[in-house]
Each structure stands twice: as structure tokens, then as C-alpha cells.
Amino acid sequence: MRYGLFVTYFPHLIAGPILHHKEMMPQFAKADIFRFSADRLADGSVMFILGLFKKSVLADAFGGYASPAFAAAATHDISFFEGWGAALSYTMQIYFDFSGYCDMAIGLALMIGVQLPMNFHSPYKARNIAEFWRRWHMTLSRFLRDYLYIPLGGNRRGLARQQGNLMLTMLLGGLWHGAGWTFVIWGGLHGLYLMVFHGWQRALNALGPGLSGAAVQRVAAPLAWLLTFFAVVIAWVFFRAPDVPSALSMLRGMAGLNGALLPDQIIKFVPALARVADGLGKVPYLANGTVMGCVEMLLMLALGLAIVLAAPTVPELRTRWRYTLVVPCAALALQRVIYGQASEFLYFQF
């Protein structure tokens, strides 16, 4: 009976957070959860509404920019601007989609008196790949650490064994999302990133404390963030692409190997841009191929980056600006749900 209660607890069932039996059963045993609490209902409702806003307003908007370009990559050459526009849009989409779902699950559980573990903590603020995995899908990271990495030996058996354990853990983490080569490569890339990071940390420690001064950190911190974010975006290309050739086509475009195409309206307005790259023309697979569509996408990307890098987290918003934000977010989310085209959560497929 107790085990059945744990495995059928509905708020987290479809896509997480991934729960431990030991963190849930003591909560189920408390008599307090069977008593109505207006404060819990209000707090949970705020989290649920903010999560719905992230999914229906932000994630779905970014999906509209990413999906056409990734679909076209299978049969067409993708330009530099199309590639980066789609990759950055998907980077925003998957974060707002999955973290929005988790906020909704946590909020729904909180309404009835149960606290689910936090699953995201501003992952795109990370300055190294290990920090990214401490902030992204935190319950999956915990699961991989406790049930794969540590049983394999963790970092207790020398550098070579640690590196192998990291790679194997992340490869299996990729397979956890789906039995396809794109997911294996995504996991392998993150395994490689972690191997490089830990090797770099050992090299820094061997060089001594001279590289940890305040002046060095002021320069290194933004570069570390940029490198980490770049690495994560590149890996997301494989995660999103329908197959490996499509992912490679997208990466060729992002590298500028297919030209730096622009909407032809911009070319006519600023003729000098025609000399920037060979074959400048339309951007048919990104933002409807129009100037206004591209401007709208750039504004959305700027907004998305501002939110993930500077805005408070949802738990912070819940306590600091609960009623100020919830009404407009609820209105926008409901408008999208009622009048927009419905789309399922991305993690439902994994």
C-alpha cells in the first residue's frame, strides 16, 4: 500500500522530478497534509501558474522558431543565422518547457501539502559544465550520481577510472532519454565536457593559487560562462535533431559553411550587406523568412536570455512578488491555452 502510494503519486508521474522513496513517505505520514491550508493553496497556485506561463507563453513561442529550421536541416542547407537562431531558440524552449512542467508539478503537489524536490536552479548561469549539471534536471543528476557514477567507483580509483566513469554515466544518461544515436552523442558530449573540466581543474590546482586572484576571476568568469553556454547549445543540437545527419547539417550552418543568409528585404534596405558573405538571400526556414519575423525572434531571444540570466527563480518570485506577477502571467497563459495551438511538453517523449 505504501509503495503503491509512492509510485502512483500523480503530480510528478509523467516527466519528473525523479523522487526518492525516503523523501516522500515521511511527508505522506504527516496528518497536516490532510488539512486544508489557504497559504499552501496560494503558494502552490502561484508556482503552477508561473510554470504554465513558462510553458505556454515562452517555450511554445521559442518552439515556433526552432522547429521549422530543424525540420528543414534534413533536406536543405541551413545558413549561419538560421542555425544559430534555431539552436538558441531550442536552448530556450527546452529550459522553459521542462522547468515549466516541473514548476507546475511542484505547485500542484504543494497545493495538497507535499513538497517535491527542486529540479532546476538557473542552469544557464553556470560557469562550468559540472555546475550546469548541479543546476539542470537536478533530480536526474542525483539519480545518475547515486545509482551509476558512485557504484562504478566515482572518483575513488584514480583519474583514468574517474574519466571513464564520467563518460559511461553520461552515455547512459543520454540513452535514458531515448534509444537513438542523437541522444548517445548528446550524452557523450556532456561526458567529454566533464572529462575536460575535471582535467582542467587538476591542471589549475597543479599551477597553484596564482590563477585564483580577483583580477583574474573578473576576466575568467564571463569567459567561463560563455564557453559553458556555447558547449551546452552545441550539445542541444544533437538532442533536438531528428537524426545525426540533420544535426551535422545544422552544425555546418552554425559554422558558416553554408553562407550567412539574410532576409532579402534586409539586403535591399542595406545593399552593403550583400558583400558580407557569398550567396546572401532569403532565410526561408527561420521566423517565416521575414524581417519582422527575425526581429521578433531576436527580441524573444533577448528576453529569454534576460530571464534565465537575471530574473529571480520561480521559488523566489513565489515569495517576493506573488500577487504582482501571478495575475498577468495567468492571463497570458490562459490566453495561449484557450486561443493558441496546444503542444505537449517536450519531456513527455522521453
Image: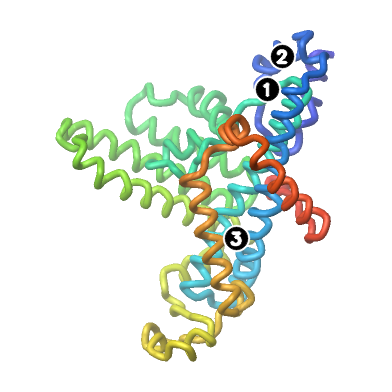
**Circle 3 SS class:** loop
Q: Are marks 2 and 1 in contact (CB under 8 Å)?
A: yes
In the displayed orientation, state which residue is furthest to the front: 324
**Circle 2 SS class:** helix
Using the image, tell me which numbered label, if any, was put on residue 27: 2
Q: Amino acid at mark 1?
A: Gln
Q: Toward the viewer: 233 or 311?
A: 311
Task: From this view, report whether residue 338 is shown above or below residue 285.
Answer: above
Q: Is residue 323 left or right of residue 276?
A: right
Instruction: Tell me residue 73's x, y (percent).
Output: 59, 71
Q: Residues within 10 Å of mark 3 (few under 14, many from 20)?
A: many
Instruction: Tell me residue 282's x, y (percent).
Output: 55, 84
Q: Residues within 10 Å of mark 1 (few under 14, many from 20)?
A: some
Determine if residue 140 is in view: no
Label 3 belongs to which residue?
A: 241
Mark earlier in primary sequence (2, 1):
2
Using the numbered discs, state the Cα–Cα distance from disc 2 to disc 1 in whole angstroms.
Answer: 8 Å
